[in-house]
Image (spheres, rainbow, N blue to C red):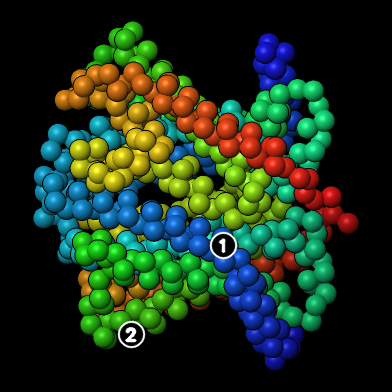
Amino acid sequence: MISEVKIYGKYLRMHLLSGMEYKGWWLMLIQVFVVVVTDPISTVLLFSRFGNIGEWTVAHIILVYALAVASFGLAESLCRGFDYFPWQLLRTGEFDRLLLRPRSLFVQVAASRFHLHRLVRPATGICAVVWALSELEVPLSPRNIAILVMALAGGCIMYCGVFVLTSGVAFFTVKGLDWIYLFTNASYQVTRCPEPYLPQALKSMFSFLLPMLFISFYPAATVCGWDYPAWPGYLALPAGAAFLGCALLVWRIGVRHYKSTGS
Amino acid sequence: MNWKQTGRASRSLLRISMAEGLQYRASAISGVFVSVFWGIIECVLFTVFYTYSDNGWNNNGLSLEQTISYVWLGQALFLFQRMNIDGELMDKINNGNVGIDLCRPLDLYTHWFVKSSAAKLGTSWIRSVATIGVGLLLPAGYALGAPESPAGFLCFLMSVSMAFILCSAYAMLVTAIRLNVTWGDGPTYILLLVSGILSGTYLPLRLWPDELQTFLYLQPFGGFADIPIQLYVGSLEPASALPGIGLQLMWSMIFIVAGRIIMNRKLHTIIVQGG
């Protein structure tokens, strides 16, 4: 286990150093920052035109949304390899080489890519969370920090699960993976809508199929003391882990099923 | 330069891309899923804002039904816009095959213009049509409504074809800028992102702050989606279709001329990369 962690660290260091060789590497940071900041622009503009929805102000929405985005960004940074897996490793047949090495497949695939600029998204997200909390006048007590960290960790694990699931399914489909977009960039758009007004079908889908609300809305509600039972706020980690567990199962089946592609 | 030859080559390029787009049906179907899902979330969001917000009356002449039609048409027209430069052209720029294309007896700008827009049309028309079809079939409240008037619908169709040309012209301008290999993807990406945001597919332009409305009407990117859709939902009367389409035409001309100038200037000093 420890050797796997060491290898993971070495991989990341290698990718980081090779990325820094490009003179314009910091330009990408700006680019990702622009993307991240402009994404919620329509929500902010809607609030400025229509005003608050009952008790929901722009800070409420930004808090929930930023939690989801930050955990997505973390997973994207740490598990980037899985994101590229279907295109870069599977279709080229490069995956055969990984299978030959006596090390964990998960670590090797997860660390096969790392881009520094991907960390801009979680960093911006966390800043937005802190801003929203100060706007809502919620103190950063140790309990609140613990809940938020658990939410981020759970969310990161859940989104890692999404990437692993994509890769697992890719063993069977090889191409045509656009639908996975539903679970990545489209999934956190749900948090732009205030939870009490969300249709029941979407609510169930994003609690039980993909435990989206457990890593964003419920922790936020517990931290701010909104009118909800407190216990779902603590469930981010188990919910994320359960999703990752299912995804790993699919991945396992996929690896078994794997017949080399490419040349 | 031989215009007749270029025209004939353009026609075949278009035919090839259409046939190619039909090959990837599975990818088109999963694309429709994503568009529809996105559209439904937007519909929910707008319904919540129109129904429960403090000043839901403040909608600048765009009713909830119109906004929901706007969402579906926006999802369909969004596919005309580029998120990145055409993959094939990008490869040519990066590995130096621009050299080969320059040897062909075709005008490079026209050749690439047709090639990239045909590729876009070939892959996206199925997805656009299917998304609109699903939008029409959804239960009332989330469904795409009928056009405001027959005249409005005609203007919409004209404006949509103009929008396609405008999108392609802008993409070509960005491609011409991208010929500066050393700049990398950053600047082009930001240019495309800005055009996407200001096109109205993020948020109907009418719902942006009032102070910006004049600017939003005159800026080029409204022609990508906002002008045609407003003609369809009737927040822009058929009478004001002519100025709207004129605006699209004017910006297309500007983009085409600018793209040509930048490309020609760049081609004088081009360094072909790779071997």
**Which residue is found at the position 71% from the left and 74% from the top?**
B108
Instruction: Residue at 66%, 59% (x, y): give it.
Output: B87
The answer to whether A2 appears left or right of B66 in the picture is right
For residue A121, say whether it is visible. Answer: no
Host chain of mark 1: B
Q: Dot 1: what SS?
A: helix
Q: Is residue A32 left or right of residue B102?
A: left
- Which one is in front, A184 or A206? A206
| The image quarter in which residue B234 lies | bottom left
Label 2: chain?
Answer: B
Q: Which mark is residue B154?
A: 2
> Which residue is drawn at the image coordinates 25% and 71% (left, top)?
B145
Is residue A218 in view? yes
Mark 1 to mark 2 CA distance (whole Å) = 32 Å
Q: Element at badge 2?
A: helix
Query: Is residue B23 shown above or below B31?
Result: below
For residue B175, above or below residue A32: below
Q: Which residue is mark 1?
A: B26
Report the front residue among B192 and B141. Answer: B141
Q: Where is residue B170 drawn, in percent x and y?
A: 53, 66
**Amino acid at dot 1:** Ala
Residue A102 or residue A249, whichever sits in front: A249
Rendered-image quadrant of the N terminus of chain A: top right
The amino acid type of the residue labelled 2 equals Leu
